[in-house]
Structure formats: C-alpha cells, structure tokens
Amino acid sequence: MKQHLDLYLTLLKTSIISQFQYRVAHLFWLLAMMVEPVVYLVVWGTIATSQGGSVAGYTAGTFAAYYITWTLVRQMNIALTPYAFENRIRKGRLSNELMRPIHPIHFDMSYFMSLKVVTIVLWLPIAGLLWWVFQPIFTFTAWWQIPAFILALLGGFVTRFLCLWALGLVTFWVTKVSAVFELYFTIELLLSGRLVPLAIMPAWVRDISQWLPFQWTFGFPIDVAVGTLTGPQVAWGLAMQAVWMLIAGGILALVWPHAVRRYSAVGA
Amino acid sequence: MSQTIKVDTLIKTFQVPEREAGLKAAVGSLFKRKYREVEAVKKISFGIDAGEIVGFLGPNGAGKTTTLKMLAGLLFPTSGQIDVLGYEPQRREKELLRQITIVMGQRNQLMWDIPALDSFELQRAIYQIPEGEFRRMRDELIDLLSMGDLVKKPVRNLSLGERMKAEFISALLHRPKVLFLDEPTIGLDVTAQRLIREFVAAYNQRYQASVMLTSHYMADVQALCKRVIVIHHGQLLYDGGLAGLVEKFAAYKTIGVTLNDPDLDLSEYGEIISNSKGQVNLRVPKNATAQITTRLLNEVAISDLTIEDPAIDSIIEQVFQQEAQVV
C-alpha cells in the first residue's frame, strides 16, 4: 500500500510539473470547451423563459446551475480516449510502459488525475464568471450533498476511465476501430445528460439509461450538486457507479492478459 | 559462469494481411481477407553468460529486433523456450522487469517536457529503489556520463547525444542485470558514440551485467563485443568470437605494398583496390596470401609490405549477401 501511494504521489507530482509547462494551452483548451455548455445553457434558458418559466421542472436558474456544474464534471471525467489507445498500439508506444514493473493503467490514471489539478485551478475563474452572468439556482437540502457530490464526481471519473480503457482494448484485435468509438461517444452524448438533462428526455430513454454506465458518469454528479435528487436516489447512483466500476474493472482484468499477447510492438 | 539468457529453438511467426494493388483487390479484401504467414525468427538457440556483452548482428529485417522484443517480454514467441534470469519474459513478472532494461536508439522513454532529473525520480518510484541507493546510483551515472547540470534542463531542450545519455541513466537507475540495447548510438556523432560505448563497457564491468547489443555501427561491436551472433532471414548464421567471424567469412585478405617504382603494374598478383603514388592495395584470395606474398617479395622491388584482414563492415556485408546456412 505504501509503495503504491509513493508511486501515485510521484506520478502525480511529475505529471503536474509536466502539465504546468503548458498552462496557456490548457487555458485556451478549457475556454474552447466552455462553448458547448454555454450554447446549451442559452438555448434551454430561452426555451424555459418562453414556456412560462420552466421545462420539465427546470427554470432558467436551475438550467444555469446544471450547465455550470456540467463544465466542472466535463473536466473531471476526461479520461484516456480509445483513440489514444489505438494510436499507442498502432505505433508501438505501449512498449515503454510494458517494460515497467507496473500496470500501464496506473500511468494513465495518475496522468489524468494530475490534469484535473491543473484544470480546476484554471476553471475556477471561468466558473465565477459564468455564475455572475447566468445566476444559477442550486437547491441545498442536506449537509451530505457536498460530500456526496465529491464522491459522485470521483466515482464518475473512475467509472468513465475504466469503461474507456476497457473499450480501448478492442484495438489489440482490430487495428482501426475509430467508427466503434464514434458510436460509443454518440450514445454517451445522448444518454449521459451531456446534451440535455435526462429529466427532459422521454421516459423510455431514462429507463434505458438507468442500466447503462453513461448517466452515472455525467448527469448523476450534476444532479447531486444541483439538488434534484433524494437521499435514496443518490445512494442508488453511487451504487450504480460501483457496479460499473466492477464490471469494467473485471473486463479489464480478464481481457488484458489476452490483449497483451496480441501486441506486436510495431515500430518500437 | 552461469547463463542469464537461454534461448532454445525460438520461433516467431507473424500473420500479415496481403492483397494485390488496385481498387478491385481493395474491395475484394473487404469480404475475404488473405493472410500470409511470415516466419521472422526460425528456430534460433543461444545462451549468454552473466557479464557477457554480445553483439547481435543482421541486416534490416533479419529478425534482430523481433528476437530482442521476445527476450524483453514485449512479444510472445510462437514456439520455443526463453529463459531470462530464470523467468519466462512473456509472462512479464514484476521480479524480472525489475532486473532488465531495454534502450532503443529511436525511442524516447523520458518525459519530454520536464527535466530528466524529475523523470529519474519517477523511475525511483516505479522500481521502488530505496532513497539512498537511488541517489548514489543517479549521481554515479550522471558522473560516468559527464551530464552535470544538463539533467536539470527539460528533455526537449537537450541535443540528441545528451538525450541519449539521459535515457541511459534513466534505464539503468534500477541497476538491471540484463541490458537489451537496440541501436543505442544511432544518429549520434562520433564523440557521443564513443562516450556511450565507454559507458556501456564501464557499467558492464562494474555490475557484471549481461548486454545484448544490436548496432549497424561496427565500431560499437568491435569496441564492446568479444562475441557476436549473426542472424539473417531469421536464421542463425554465426555464433562465436568476433575474430572467428573474420576467419570464417573473410574470403580475401588485403596486401599493401609500397613500390620503389610507382609505375609498376601489379594486376597479375591480385585485384588492385587502390593505387596512389606507389602505395598499392591488392585483394587476394585468403588461401593464396602466403604464396602471393612470397612472389611479391622475390619478384618486385618493394620498400614495405603489410597483410590485413578486410574491414569488419565488409565481412558482415559479405555474410549478409550469402544464402543463410544454419550453423
């Protein structure tokens, strides 16, 4: 345990040093990523106002709360995309990582965790500006909402990270699988709460998304922060995150030894 | 002396997709894909002792890197046995990975944006090197490679030679017992090449590490390896001393003579390789060297005569041009 802690802390420290080398690039990247939620926010805020103040219970203020939290959740659940995995295998870049006496997943995990440290620092002033412009309305019903949100945010990242890593393993069998990844991300966009809050979606869409990982990585942490969920709903969401972590982690543990056998280390 | 690497009838076969050129063939391959089996390594066997430096030679595509990757555990062999320090490398057990390293001349393992010193710290954590031992080893390697304060500069700002030296430090911090070096001096200038060679020799001597080296620079091989393994088309052509390679494959010798009369024609004694102001180099069949030398001394007025083996590069080239004959 002590060994792993030392490794993670050093990996985090090294990655943060590396990330801060490009803080301006990060800032512009972050600003570019803000365009998407601001567009959604303006559109849904306008619709809510034109429909007498709310859409499916969401007012302009709660939409603002949803999409401002969205910007944080989006930053927090960024993980290694399967595209990067494809690139890594096609060009043999996995070789370096395979030579180390540690599973490559730890490098990716620590890298993306360090990315969050940098982006949170840069996100805070942007969030402050959005808050000032759009006047969000959060509902705080109980003290546990804050720790539950932090837990849901962390759980969302780990769940998404493991799911994407597991999906990336497909690359060991099929060299170019970008089309499969596109399909995955389109479904994720629709069923995660990224495009619109799931509460606005038809009931059958909500029913399906209950049993898929997407909403637990995106819409769920936002709903916890905005205050639209009851205590049992929050507990259920955290449990679903745990279930999907176990499923994706199990797939990884089972498939990885077979995947590595297929690695051809081309170009490295 | 105990063997750290044992390879027995190792085979590696790749399945390579193939199709004819053109649109019709491309469409056809959508429905029915054809594969061809390519045997990259064909039943090779050898062993390497602790503390031994072995040159692993062969032309591009001979199967050198494929073999090295199998020995390092990056590739699974199709069949045959590999034993490195008592482990099967393809199982990638942590205990083995902590004792080996691979340095590839065309691959960067250090983090690009941060000083090498920070990357070394990462290596410490990865290999769980005790703090005191890490500092001692790091400083020793920095000193051996005369890196000084260069390790404080971001890796992207280092020259190719400096970067390669930093790569070596990073790769050896955990004091590996087996080193796989794949073209470690490629692209480096002569001084940097010499430094790297001296460093590898010093590390080998100090820690009795086994080293397997592939290089297209014969100067690397001559400086470091008493023994060479030559493979071609995936087959073992030669395994033995560097001197033996010359003896076995050099069909010619070079006789150099300094003539008293610079205009004298020596073409009847052998093939003239060069002729400059009476300094003539003749290529003669190896088994006729003694006889031709005697004739030259008796029949021609010469002030000096030397007999040399051809350069190792040309012998290797000659070996590669021959059909593969398994030793």
Image: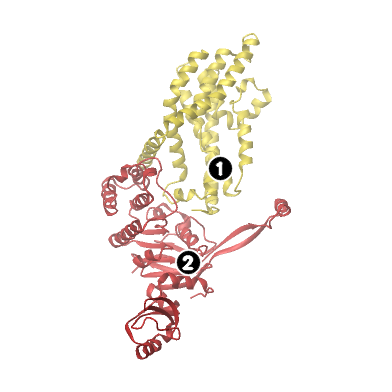
Q: Amino acid at mark 1?
A: Gly
Q: Is residue B29 above or below residue A201?
A: below
User: Gap between marks 2 and 1, in whole Å?
Assistant: 36 Å
Q: Chain of mark 2?
A: B
Q: Is residue B141 above or below residue B302?
A: above
**Depth check: A190 or B65 in front?**
B65
Q: Which residue is mark 1?
A: A168
Point 64% across, 61% down: residue:
B36
Residue B98: percent from left, percent from top: 38, 53
SS state under label 1: helix
Q: Chain of mark 1?
A: A
Residue B225: percent from left, percent from top: 36, 67
Q: Is residue B126 above or below residue A240?
A: below
| Chain ID for red | B
SS state under label 2: loop
**Depth check: B54 or B260 in front?**
B260
**Depth check: B207 or A28 in front?**
A28
Point 50% across, 20% down: residue:
A225
Count neighbours of disc 1 (C-alpha within 10 A) and say few if under 14, some if 14 to 19, many if 20 or more: many
Q: Is residue B259 above or below residue B185?
A: below
Q: Please identify the residue farthest to the bottom as the structure is shown.
A: B298
Mark 2 and mark 1, same subunit?
Answer: no
Q: Which residue is mark 2?
A: B58
Residue B315: percent from left, percent from top: 44, 73
Chain A drawing hue: yellow
Q: Amino acid at mark 2?
A: Gly
Residue B165: percent from left, percent from top: 34, 52
